[in-house]
């Protein structure tokens, strides 16, 4: 049997070669370890000699579907091999009724608050999939759900002030701000009272222009330093100066489990650094806008994770008009359990969309 690596497909592999390739990939996904010919010859369903298997593995190496961490080791799938396996050989089952009910119960317990739904979804995916859970919230979800109850400024020192924003849904946000020169503690208190009175029961975004107009017209009855602090805060809090969408990441600790080698530790460290690059992660999740269902990125298929050898499984969720408004998924090592994670991510995305439409 002779192969060339150009323009081949699974149909170019005979039944025996496909079977050996499939067994190697499944074993690697399960154990994370390279597979040797002798081990493979003793596995269930294989009735071939180690020599025959070695020859087939050599063919698969020449095609670029397998690789070896070092000369004397067994074989493991390359990135190209993983892609071919996922696209053509992966057997994806459906979730059981019990699994579906469990996911529904978990998310429903979050209530109708979108932010709590996203938190639950991200943490749930992380716990079930053994990776980090990602949720990209709709650009308007914070404004839509964030009716303000109270605002208070706290004096820290001559350079900084702390603003405490309490929302009607019970959330509390604490944010540091640069404190304008000459701003007295009494002015901080007046600025907090001024904002609380005008924001109570309203969203930050919808009240912003009205408050700024009151300040600029001189009707606010707060001094210039406090007015500057309020204007700066409104710009930051309402998203007037940034288009960054909310990104929720949970389960980083899951990625630290089952690490056996120094190379794994270095890979996870690089992945943690990637996860801090939130704007690039948002751009990655936004790529689901042209996807009908689950989308999978393996290793260097996305530049963000090219060094950490990671895979991302993501799916979009939709509003009542079937428009894609956000995405969620899982990130982990390239040997994550795709057969389990793909239907889980897909169904969770459907649930999140359904819960948002009901809210």
Image (cartoon, rainbow, N blue to C red):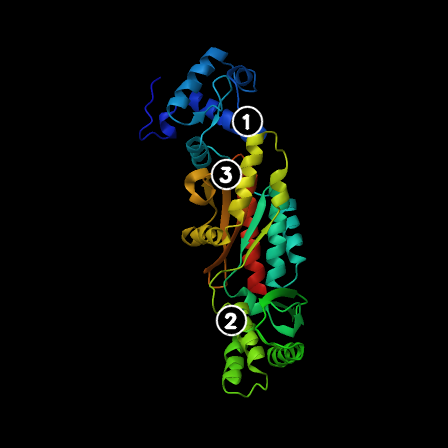
Q: Residues within 10 Å of mark 3 (few under 14, many from 20)?
A: many
Q: Which residue is mark 3?
A: 308
Sequence-first tag of 2 and 3 = 2
Disc 3 element: loop
Q: Nearer the viewer, residue 302 or 40?
A: 302
The mark lying in front, picked from 2 and 1, is 2
**Mark nearer the N terminus (3 vs 1):** 1
Q: Tell me the number on the disc at residue 235.
A: 2
Label 2 secondary element: helix
> Considering only vertical position in the picture, is 253 above or below 116?
above
Mark 1: give few (<14), some (14-19) or many (20+) Cα within 10 Å.
some
On residue 27, the disc is 1
Crowd rating for badge 2 (residues with CA inside 10 Å; few <14, some 14–19, many 20+): some
Q: Residue at x 47, y 18 (%)?
A: 71
Q: Earlier in the sequence, mark 2 or mark 1?
A: 1
Q: Quadrant of residue 183?
A: bottom right
> Looking at the image, can residue 96 be seen?
no
Helix, strand, or loop for circle 1? helix
Give the image location of residue 235, x and y in percent. Answer: 51, 71
Residue at point 39%, 20% (across, down): 59
Disc number lying in front (3 or 1): 3
Point out residue 12 in the picture as x, y percentages from the top left corner.
35, 26
Distance from disc 2 to disc 3, alpha carbons, whole Å, reads 36 Å
């Amino acid at each position: 049997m002779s192969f060339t690596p150009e323009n081949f497909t699974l149909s170019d592999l005979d039944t025996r070669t496909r079977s050996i390739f499939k067994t190697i990939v499944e074993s690697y996904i399960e154990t994370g370890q390279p597979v040797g010919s002798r081990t493979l010859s003793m596995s269930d369903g294989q009735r071939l000699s180690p020599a025959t298997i070695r020859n087939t593995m050599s063919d698969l190496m020449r095609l670029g579907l397998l690789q070896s961490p070092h000369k004397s080791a067994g074989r493991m799938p390359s990135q190209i091999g993983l892609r071919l396996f996922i696209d053509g050989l992966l057997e994806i089952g459906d979730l059981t009724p019990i699994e579906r009910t469990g996911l529904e119960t978990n998310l429903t317990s979050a209530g109708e608050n979108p932010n709590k739904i996203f938190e639950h979804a991200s943490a749930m995916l992380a716990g079930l999939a053994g990776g980090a859970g990602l949720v990209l919230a709709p650009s308007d979800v914070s404004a839509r759900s964030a009716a303000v109850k109270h605002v208070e400024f706290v004096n820290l020192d001559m350079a900084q002030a702390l603003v405490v924003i309490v929302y009607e849904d019970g959330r509390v946000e604490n944010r540091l701000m640069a404190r304008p020169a000459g701003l007295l503690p009494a002015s901080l208190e007046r600025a907090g009272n001024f904002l609380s009175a005008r924001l109570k029961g309203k969203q930050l975004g919808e009240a912003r222009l009205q408050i700024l107009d009151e300040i600029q017209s001189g009707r606010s009855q707060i001094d210039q330093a406090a007015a500057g602090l309020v204007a700066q805060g409104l710009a930051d809090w309402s998203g007037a100066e940034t288009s960054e969408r909310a990104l929720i990441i949970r389960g980083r600790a899951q990625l630290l489990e089952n690490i056996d080698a120094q190379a794994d530790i270095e890979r996870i460290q690089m992945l943690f650094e990637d996860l801090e690059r939130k704007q690039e992660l948002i751009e990655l999740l936004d790529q689901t806008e042209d996807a009908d269902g689950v989308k999978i990125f393996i290793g260097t298929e996305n530049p963000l994770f090219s060094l950490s050898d990671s895979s991302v499984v993501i799916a979009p969720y939709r509003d009542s008009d079937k428009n894609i408004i956000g995405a969620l998924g899982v990130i982990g090592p390239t040997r994550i359990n795709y057969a389990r994670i793909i239907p889980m991510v897909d169904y969770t995305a459907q649930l999140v969309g359904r819960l948002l439409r009901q809210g």
